[in-house]
Structure formats: C-alpha cells, structure tokens
Image (cartoon, grey):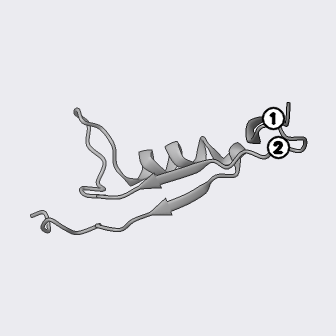
Amino acid sequence: MAPTAAHLPGEKTLTILHFNDVYNIESVDKEPVGGAARFSTALKSFSHLHPLILFSGDVFAPSFSE
C-alpha cells in the first residue's frame, strides 16, 4: 500500500492561527475579559509551533467605540 500524505517520511506540520474582527482591545476586569495584552499572550503560547499567523483585518468596523 502506498503511503498517504499523513504518513510520508519527513512529514511536516503546518499550524495556522487566523483571526479577524478585532474590536475593543482595552483590558477589562469583568467578563468577557480580553484586551490586546491577553490576546498577545495567547498568541505567544503557540510560538513553539512556529505558526503562520494570519489577520484578516476588520479592526474598526462595524463602528468606532465611544
């Protein structure tokens, strides 16, 4: 039986982290928690996988927050 793509010698893994629709990047003390710092920490937790990180945009839409 011929090897499948998942079982080829020298197999590589591609890790893709994709995000978009980024609004309200300020940290908050109540649920839902988040903010840019927390998101950055979450991304860094995958650094050992050497991921391809893709951002599709949409930072300010649907509207600016007051």
Outermost residue on the left side: it is 66
Outermost residue on the right side: it is 9
x, y percent for residue 6: 74, 37
Does 51 sit left or right of 20 as displayed? right
Instruction: State the quadrant of the C terminus.
Output: bottom left
Towards the viewer: 13 or 57: 13
x, y percent for residue 56: 39, 65
Which residue does the numbered mark 1 point to in the structure image? 7
x, y percent for residue 37: 43, 50
Quadrant of the image occupied by residue 7: top right
| Mark whose residue sits in front, 2 or 1 | 1
The residue lying at 67 percent from left, 49 percent from top is 14
Which residue does the numbered mark 2 point to in the structure image? 11
Mark 2 touches mark 1? (CB < 8 Å): yes
Q: Against 61, is 1 above or below?
A: above
The residue lying at 44 percent from left, 63 percent from top is 55
Does 41 sit left or right of 6 as displayed? left
Q: Against 62, is 7 above or below?
A: above
- Tag 2: residue type? Glu
Towards the viewer: 37 or 12: 12
Towards the viewer: 13 or 34: 13
x, y percent for residue 23: 25, 58
Towards the viewer: 29 or 63: 63
The residue lying at 26 percent from left, 43 percent from top is 28
Outermost residue on the front side: it is 1
